[in-house]
Amino acid sequence: MTVAAHAPEPGLTSAEAARRLAEHGPNEVAADRRVPLWSRVGAQLRDPLITVLLAAVALTLAIGDQPDAVVIALVIVVNTTVGVVQEVRAESAVAALSRLSAPAARVLRDGEQRGVPSTGIVPGDAVALAEGDIVPADARLVDSAALLLDESMLTGESLPVAKAVGAAVPEDETVRAGTVVLRGRALAVVTATGADSALGRIAALLRPQPEPTPLQRRLAGLGRVLAAVAVGLCAVVFVVGLLRHQPPGEMGVTAISLAVAAVPESLPAVVTLALALGARRMAARHAVVRRLPAVETLGSVSVLATDKTGTLTEGRMVVERLWTPHSTAVVTGHGYGPAGVTGHGYGPAGVTGHGYGPAGGIELDGDAEDEVRSLLTAAALCNDAVLRPPTEADDEWGALGDPTEAALLTAAGKAGLNHGQLQEAWPRTAEVPFDSLRKRMTTVHRTAEGGLLACLKGAPEAVLAPAVLDGPPELVERARKAAAALATEGYRVLAVAERHLDHLPDPPEKAEHGLRLLGLAALADPPKPSAAATLAACRRAGILPVLVTGDHPATARALAVRVGLLEASAGPEAVVSGQGPAGIGDPTQVRVFARTDPRQKLDIIQAWRARGAVTAMTGDGVNDGPALRQADIGVAMGRRGTEVARQAADLVLADDELATVVGAVAEGRRVYDNIRRFLVYGLAGGAAEILVMLAGPLFGLALPLRAGQILWINLLTHGLTGVAMGAEPLSPGAMARPPRPPRQHILGSGVWQRVLLLGVVAAAASLGAALWAHGGERPWQSVLFLALLAAQLGVVLGLRERLLTRANLFLPLAVLASAALGAAALYLPFLRDVLDTVPLSWSDLAAPVVAGLVGFVAARLRKQGI
C-alpha cells in the first residue's frame, strides 16, 4: 500500500492553505493555455475605435502632420499595452487553480518513505491525514479518529465538518482535495485526482472567457458610429468645396483634417486615465482592481450577489445566547477577544449584566449568575482550543483548534473565566474525543477536593437523552424546545452537562451517564457591524443585494433577516435551497439562495445576466471561482480569500469589507460620468468644426479654416484639456440614482441631443464672431480660429458638475494652457507661419471672448444629465 502524508501544521486555516498551495508547483487539475502575444495585440487593434485611430494616423501622415500622427499613435500604443497586460493577468485564474493541490507527499514504497510530487498520487493510494494537513485528492475514509475538516473553501459552509468511517451519511465518509484537517487523524483511499476531483470540476467551470464589459461594448458601438459619420460628413465637405470651385488638393487635405477632428482620438487616453485614477482611488480605499475596465462596470452593477461567510459575517463562530434551567442570557462582542458583556434575556445585543464584563446595566440574581458561570466553566474545561492574544503582526485575538470550541472559550473569558486558571484548578485526567457518530465529547478533571468532575458537551440530540442525563423529564423537554427554537433561528446549539465522580470508570465512556444538565450555548457566525448599513446603501443606489451561500437554509435565513435582506415575517419558503434557477421560476423574486454548489452559483449569475442585469459576485473560496469569473464583476476577499478566488476576480478587497464595494461602485459611476462628459465635450467640438466648415461658405466665408488650424484646435481641445476631464470628482447624488441600463448606448439618455445643441451653439458663436470680423474688414479667419477654440474651452468649464471645486485643479490649468497655446498660434512667428494666422488687436479679441462665454453659458444651462 502506498501512503502519502504531509507534515502537520496546527492552526492552518483554509484561506492560508489556499495561499500556501498556490505558491507551489503545478498539478494536473487544469492546464494553463498560453496565447501568443501577437494574437493578443491583434485582438486589441481590431477594436473599432482603435481602427479609426489607425486610419487617423495614416491620414495625418498623408498630409504631413507628423506631430499629430505621433500623438495618436502613442495613444494607440498605450491603450493596446494596457489591454494586453490586463488580459494576461486575468487569465492566471486557471493557472492558479492548476496549482491548488498538496505541494508534496511522503509515500511509503518498498517499506520506506520517500518524497514525491503530489501529482504522483493516483486512485487507490492510501493517504494519511493529520491535524494541519491539506487533503491532496478526493478520498474515502478507511480509518479515522475525531476527524474534523474545514471545507469552507469548497462548500462555503462556515462550520467545520466532522468525518468518520461508518457515518450515517455517505458524504461524511469522504474527504475532498484542498480541504484542511482541523483536528484528528485518518487514513483514506484516493478515489479521484486531477480533472475528476472536486477541484478539477471547478476548473472546468472556470474555462469560459469573460465577456466584454458594458463600457467595452458601448465604446465599440461608438467607434463604428463615429467612423461612419466622420467619413460621411467629411465627404460632404469635400464635395461642397469642389462645387464652390475650391482646389481639389486643398479640399482633400481639409476633409482629412476634419476627419481627424471629428474623431475624439484622445478618448482612449481619457478612458485609460479615468480608469487608472479610479483604480488608484479604489486602492486607497482597500479595493485592488485587476482589470481596468472593471472600474467602470462597477458603476453599472444592478445586482450584487454576495456570499455569507467572511463577507456579510465575521467568518468566525461566536456564542450569542445562553440558556440555563432558570435563566437566559445574551453574549455580545466581536471576534475571539475575551471582552464583551453578558446580558439578561433574549433582547438585542448590548443588554448588559452585572459582573460579566467591562460594562453593567441589569443585575442578574445569584442563582442565574451561578448557573451561567457553571455552564461556561464546563464548556471551557471540555475544550481543546487555545486563544491567542494580539501580536505586533495582528492586532486581533486569534484561535487554534475547532472554531466552535474557540467561541466557547471566548464566551467564558467574557464571563471573567480564565482558561489557563481553569485548567490548573481542574487538571484533565481522561477524555472521550468527539466523533461524528457520538456527536459529543467528554473530559474528566480532578477537583481540588480530590474527586473527579466529568464535563460533556455535544449536539442536543446526543445529550438531551435519558441515557445521558439524570434529571426531571420536564426539564429535558424544556431544553429540547429551547434548542429547537434556537436552531430555527439559524444557531448551532450545543448542550453542556456535568457529573461528579468518585473514581474514573473503565472505559471512560461510562462517565457519560447520569449527568446534570447545565444548559445550552447557541453559536453563530454573526454579521459584520457594517453589513446591514452596506446593504441599505446598495438599495439606495438601485443595486439589488442577493445572498448566495452554501450554508444551511435556516442559517441563511437568520442572517438575511438580521442584515435586512428579508423581513422578520418571511417564512422558510423565502429561501431557495440547492437548485438552479430552472427550478425556481423567476430568480428576480428570490433574495436568498442556500446549499448552493459551484455549478448552481454559476447558474444563478447566468440567469440574472440573461435578464439584462449587470452582476457583481463576492466570494472567497475555490467554490466561488467560476461565479466570480462569470459575473460582470467578480469581487474576492483579500485577507481570507483563496488564491483561486483572487485570480478569478476583477476586484480584490484588501480589507474584506463589503462596504468597500459600495465605495468602488461610486468610483465606477464617477468614471462613467467623466467619460460621458468628455464625449459631450469632444463630439460637440467636432460637430462645431464640421458645421463651421459646412455653413461658412453659405455666409461668404469661402474656406473658413485651413487644415493646420483645424488640427491645432483639435490638439488643444482633445489633448490635456480632454484628458483632464477624466479626473473630475464624483457628481452629487450619483449614489442616489439607479444604475444605467446595460444596453443603453453611451450617447443615450439625451447625450447626443446635448452634443448637437452645444455643437450648434459653439458653431453659431464662432461664425458670428467671424462674420463680425469679416464685416469690419478684420482678419476674420484668425478670429474664427480663436473663437472656435474659446467656445470649446468655455463648454468644458461649463460642463463641470461643481464649478469651483478644488478636487481637480488639473482641468482649469489645462484650459489655461490650451488658451495660451491658442494665443501663441497668433503671436509666435513660427506658429503663425505654419498655421497661416495673423495677430489680433485687443478689440479683435473681444469676439473670441464672447464666443467662449456663450459656450460656457450654454453648457451650464444643462449641465445635469451627463
Image (cartoon, rainbow, N blue to C red):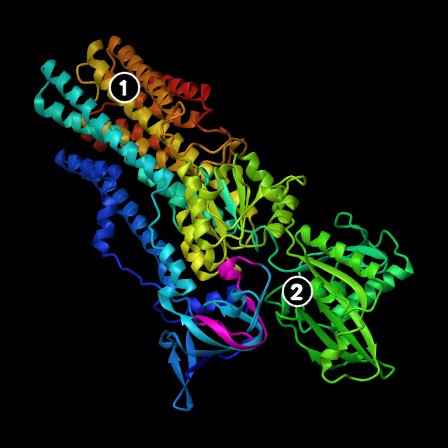
* Residue placed furthest toward the right: 366
Could you say which disc has been placed on residue 404 in the image?
2
Which region shows up in magenta?
130-157
Residue 832 appears anywhere in the view? no
Badge 1 local density, few (<14 within 10 Å), some, or many (20+)? many
Q: CA distance from mark 2 to mark 1?
A: 78 Å
Task: Give the answer, above or below, for where 521 lies relative to 840.
Answer: below
Position of residue 162 in the picture relative to residue 23 (left or right)? right
Position of residue 225 in the picture relative to residue 313 (left or right)? left
The residue singled out by tag 1 in the image is 784
Position of residue 91 in the picture relative to residue 479 (left or right)? left
In this view, the residue in front, 55 or 433, is 433
Q: Earlier in the sequence, mark 2 or mark 1?
A: 2
Q: Secondary structure at mark 2?
A: helix
Q: Amino acid at mark 2?
A: Thr
Badge 2 local density, few (<14 within 10 Å), some, or many (20+)? many
Residue at figure coordinates x 54%, y 76% from the top left: 9
Q: Amino acid at mark 1?
A: Leu
